[in-house]
């Protein structure tokens, strides 16, 4: 699924403002079991055979890609602490969306999602994960990937490499990022 398909989807029209994304605190959201479970008597195999599972995962990935783009200003945008907690609460779903995009060959969208969360992964608990996601996705990126997306990913990978004391690798990543811009 190309990343350009996501913004035009009718799913996102209701989520265009910060208040829409933040209106329901993560702790007060409805249980995922109540809103996302499969119909009674329907097996996973039946859902997969009808293509519903793939469609649901595509919608899930598209929603979280849009969410990550909206959250990108993070500490520089409105209500930075709220955004940090919201991203942290949705981190399992964000990881799932990146994994789905990656497994389905949309590395550019996965890099876009990961790059939008670079500010979040600067927190000490997540810096290694930031590096791992970006470096894995960079290795899988093809020649047709958008240069700005790749440059952003290289920058996001170079910083944690430097923090981990891998200055030679960090320099290589950061210099490559400059050539991509």
Image: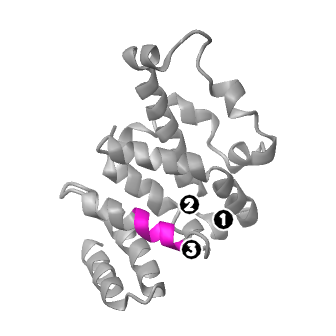
Instruction: State which quadrant residue 156 falls in.
Output: bottom left
Residue marked by disc 3: 122
Q: Is residue 129 magenta?
A: yes
Circle 1 SS class: loop
- Mark 3 to mark 2: distance in Å? 13 Å
Which of discs 3 and 2 lies nearer the camera? The answer is 3
Do labels 2 and 1 touch, CB within 8 Å?
yes
Main secondary structure type of the part rendered in magenta: helix
Residue marked by disc 1: 77
Horizontal relation, residue 18 to residue 118: left or right? right
- The residue carrying pointer 1 sits among few (fewer than 14), some (14 to 19) or many (20 or more) residues within 10 Å by Cα, namely few
- Mark 3 to mark 1: distance in Å? 16 Å
Residue marked by disc 2: 72
Tell me the magenta residue range: 127-133
Instruction: State which quadrant residue 93 falls in.
Output: top right
Q: Residue at x 48, y 68 (%)?
A: 130
Residue 85 percent coordinates (x, y): 72, 59
Q: Residue at x 53, y 73 (%)?
A: 127
Label 2 or label 1, whichever comes before in sequence order: 2
80 vs 90: above or below: below
């Amino acid at each position: 699924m190309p990343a350009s398909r996501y913004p035009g989807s009718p799913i996102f029209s209701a989520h265009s403002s910060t208040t829409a994304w933040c209106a329901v605190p993560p702790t007060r959201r409805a249980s995922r079991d109540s809103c996302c479970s499969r119909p009674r008597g329907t097996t996973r195999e039946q859902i997969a055979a009808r293509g519903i599972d793939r469609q649901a995962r595509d919608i899930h990935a598209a929603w979280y890609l849009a969410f990550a783009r909206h959250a990108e200003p993070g500490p520089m945008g409105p209500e930075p602490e709220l955004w940090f907690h919201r991203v942290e609460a949705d981190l399992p779903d964000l990881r799932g969306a990146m994994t789905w995009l990656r497994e389905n060959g949309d590395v550019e969208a996965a890099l876009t999602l990961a790059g939008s969360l670079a500010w979040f992964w600067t927190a000490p608990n997540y810096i290694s994960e930031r590096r791992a996601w970006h470096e894995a996705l960079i290795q899988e990126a093809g020649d047709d990937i958008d240069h700005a997306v790749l440059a952003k990913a290289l920058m996001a990978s170079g910083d944690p490499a430097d923090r981990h004391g891998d200055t030679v690798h960090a320099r290589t990543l950061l210099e490559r990022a400059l050539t991509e811009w």
